[in-house]
Image (tube, rainbow, N blue to C red):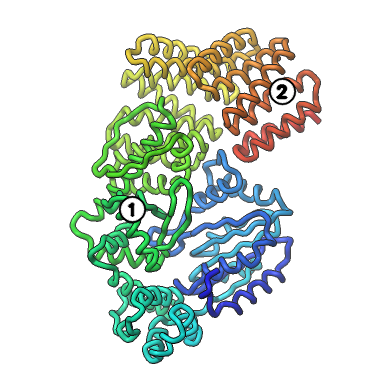
Amino acid sequence: MPATFTDRESDLAALINQIGELPDYTVRMVVISGPGGVGKTTLANRLLHQVSTEYGGGQLYADLHGYAPEGPARTSEVLARFLRSLRPGAQPASVEELAAWWRSVTASQPDRPAIVLLDNARNAAQVRALLPGGRGHLVVVTSRDRLAELAPDGAVLHRLNPFDEAAAQQYLTRCLGEHRVAREAGATAQITRRAAGSPMALALTVTHLATAPDRPFAELVSGAPSSAPPDPSHPQIALQEAAVNQALDQSYWSLPRSTPAPAVYRRMASVFTSDFDLPLTAAVCNLTGAEAEAVLELLHERNLIELHQESAARSRVYRFHDTARAHARDRARREATFGEPEEILQRAMDFYLTTASAAEKILTPTHRPLRRDYVYPPAELIVFAGEAAALDWLYSQRDNLLYAVRAAVAAGMDRSAWQLAHAIWPLLRSSHDYALWSESHELGLQAARRCGDREAEVEMLSTWGVGLRGAGNFEAATETFAALLRLAREEEDRRAEAQALHELGSVRLHGGHPAEAADFLLRARQQRVELGRTSESQSDRLTYTRAVAITNVCLGQAQLELRRPAEAIETLRNARTTLLDIQDPLDAARALAWLARAHAIGGNPNKGEEEGRRAIAECEAAGSARWRAHSRELLGHTLRDAGRVVEARNLYQEAIGIYAAVSRRDEDRVRRHLQELS
């Protein structure tokens, strides 16, 4: 904690005492309210630091953006972010399912309560939607409003007041030195009065003064008035925020005009992202990486931006305090040159499209390539060291990528919208984030249609249908793939037609209609074999060879459902041989897991067990959590059928433990198998 934590010890002690008096059989809640820049988040973090040892379930943070110009954060996005932190893997698309899973997950470990910090809440409804399930958790909320509606829920309501004059002077003394403050007592008093007790205004002033140790305080007292006039409807809050805006003005105008710092401050506040890093800054502001790094360090030193986090995928990540962001956007509106706002948006969009497309090429080289249109491609591209680095970047930018698609649609940049929705395919395939999948593809499909790009429309329908099927929405998936089939035939796109047939077969299989599934899959396989035979490029032949094998894996499952194990064994064996030949270890392991099951159903349980255990080992090596679980589930069926109930139960329990982190729907299915054993 910083040494300059001033005048909040009594607040801290009071909150700790009040939390201790709250019953542990419910969710404990504290609301810290006060004007912008008064130090609510700083106090909340100090509080959590003090009590963290009592909460073994970890700490979660969300900025609810209650006072942001673009409006509050969506509840579904916050819930999804929390769940990704606790249970990475597949997530439902609806806010109701997300909320139910969030409450279930947080209620499942009563001996390990968690801390949740909800920053910048606008109203009580925002908070209530995010309360964890179970008991003993601590939820700390910050807001400019009192949120008295939460009092009946047992919330402690704590109003954080501005510094009084003595505390403000103590803060200046700690930061700038007793001798310097005492030397100019009159100017110091004027500075503290002008700051109106706002810690943020004082911090900006201290930073400004610290850059020139010999500069008299008196020079600062005659500064310009705030750029944001007080709001008469909130006079007390307006007084503090006007002081912050005046301090921001002073810091802004003190930035060296010979550097790009003022422009970077204005531009980055205008970007649609929730945070920003060095590569994005360089692209948006047309700087080299070294120039961008120097400017970001300067803005951070001047307290105009905050260091949000440091990550392996993005290094140093920055963000704006909401008041500073509003100030910077106001400066941008006043100082923007003709066409500058459009250029900023296009540069940011091109950065995300370029980088996501580079990751896509590394992670999913067989994904159907579509056009990419750039106006300002970044001068310095991010070069990924390999698949892990590319996927880490996509995961770390998940929210910003969705914001980019939304911003492109809102600005009428339809080509950028559908191209970015297409480029994030490897993130969707890996994360099974169905909320992101659904929204990005709905927007992308509409954008492709507005562009009149039938090839893009075909691809959007195809990958959206996959997401609907994965989310268990089989009816909508069937409609989507039927639309894809019609469009593919209209366009005489045989590749898309084969894909639609395959996916219709897969949906019917998952929906419990194996005979219909087998019919679709046989037609898909025949068409893919013909496409591979007539392909001119080696790359296309390899793509269709793999596609035939993947169709055979699905077809083998349909044949098993139809109690035709001999056919399934032949189909799955051919699929596995092909997948091993083309060095696709995960799909080869999937084929083996089903092949083992086919041997068991066909009357050879010993071979089924032998190959089932080998499939588990191969799925472990491939690293897919879903198939680590599913291979155990399939072998559990084989041992159950052989009467080896204890071993089957152990495998089901192992599968449940793995599924718990990736798929609630699959976890529930295996729990039903476990109950049936009893």
Which residue is found at the position 31% from the left and 28% from the top? 454
Secondary structure beneath label 2: helix
Q: Is residue 33 left or right of residue 635?
A: left
| 179 vs 42, nearest the viewer | 179
What x and y, as percent, mark residue 17? 68, 74
Q: Residues within 10 Å of mark 2 (few under 14, many from 20)?
A: many
Q: Residue 436: x and y, percent?
A: 46, 42
Question: How many angstroms separate mark 2 from mark 1 (CA)?
Answer: 54 Å
Q: Is residue 627 visible?
A: yes
Numbered tag placed on residue 637 in the rendering:
2
Q: Can residue 147 be spotted in the picture?
A: no
Screen quadrant of the C terminus: top right
Q: Amino acid at mark 1?
A: Thr
What's the residue at 44%, 48% (across, down)?
Answer: 399
Q: Is residue 652 above or below residue 341?
A: above
Residue at figure coordinates x 60%, y 32% from the top left = 626
Q: Is residue 670 left or right of residue 218?
A: right
Q: Which residue is mark 1?
A: 281
Residue 63: mark: none
Amino acid type shown at disc 2: His
Counting from the top left corner in percent of width and height, residue 456 is at 33, 31
Q: Nearer the viewer, residue 673 or 87?
A: 87
Q: Indicate the quadrant containing the N terminus: top left, top right, bottom left or bottom right.
A: bottom right
Residue 262's place in the image compared with 401, above or below, is below
